[in-house]
Amino acid sequence: MNKQADWRDRIDSALKGNRRDAYSRYLQLATVGLDGAPRCRTVVFRGFQEEGNTLLAITDGRSQKVAEIARDSRAQVHWYFVRSREQFRMETRITTVDLVSQESLVADVWSRLSEAARAQFFWRPPGEAVNTGESVPPTENPPDNFLVMLIEPQQVDYLWLGKRHRRVISVRSGDTWSEGEVNP
């Protein structure tokens, strides 16, 4: 899908208007746990895929969310921009990709990470005890456990909490989006 959806323009504007706040790049991602219960965590928005409306985030392939996504790709994203008072709730499908499946994309995302962000992928697996004596190996190339999450919105519920609240629902059908304003 190459056409940028209307909701994308609203997110681009919110990102621009809230760029002074580092936390405006944090979004909440809820998946379906292996036990069927919801699981929610914060992830960092890493941009959009070059063409289209797919959000990018990263994860450690050894984390629980990877198994959850493999079992059920449905997820919900909640993203709130404090300064502009805008909320985006997205029903999504998530796919994870690695260096083997999408080399150029994964290498590009890896190259834009700070050294501190890269180092985390060389730590012990998530949930294991910390070993403070560990040294971090060179981080020039991504390890096998570095994954990029492709977050593909299927529906976007936008709410602006300004003087006159505004709510717009955008729904994907195939390669097209339709949207309508609803009562907040």
Image (cartoon, grey):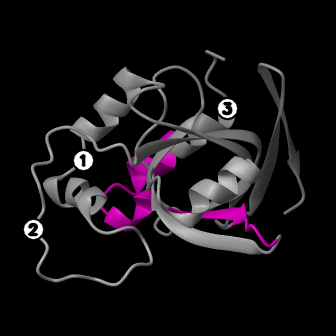
Q: Residue at x 51, y 68 (%)?
A: 42
Asked if residue 152 lies left or right of residue 145, the reply is right
- Which quarter of the picture shows residue 11? top right
Which residue has dot 2 on it? 135
| Circle 2 Cα neighbour tier, 10 Å, few/some/many (<14 / 14–19 / ≥20) | few
Does 19 sit left or right of 73 as displayed?
Answer: left
Depth check, front residue: 27 or 86: 27
Q: Is residue 79 left or right of residue 133?
A: right
Q: Dot 3: what SS?
A: helix
Which of the two discs, 2 and 1, sits closer to the camera?
2
Of residue 115 and residue 129, the one placed in the foreground of this image is 129
Mark 3: which amino acid? Asp
Q: Which residue is mark 3?
A: 6
Mark 2 or mark 1: name the one nearer the start of the chain.
Answer: 1
Foreground: 161 or 137? 137
Is residue 141 found inside the magenta-colored segment of the image? no
The residue that label 1 is drawn on is: 113
Contact between marks 2 and 3 (CB within 8 A): the answer is no
Q: Which residues are magenta?
A: 12-35
Tell me the kind of residue under disc 1: Leu
Q: Are marks 1 and 3 in contact (CB under 8 Å)?
A: no
Check if residue 17 falls in the magenta segment: yes
Q: Secondary structure at mark 1?
A: loop
Task: Give coordinates of residue 18: x percent, y percent.
Answer: 40, 58
Image spot of residue 58 (x, y percent): 43, 49
Q: Name the residue at 70% across, 62% down.
A: 31
Residue 150 appears in which quarter of the rendering? top right
Q: Cα distance, mark 2 to mark 1?
A: 19 Å
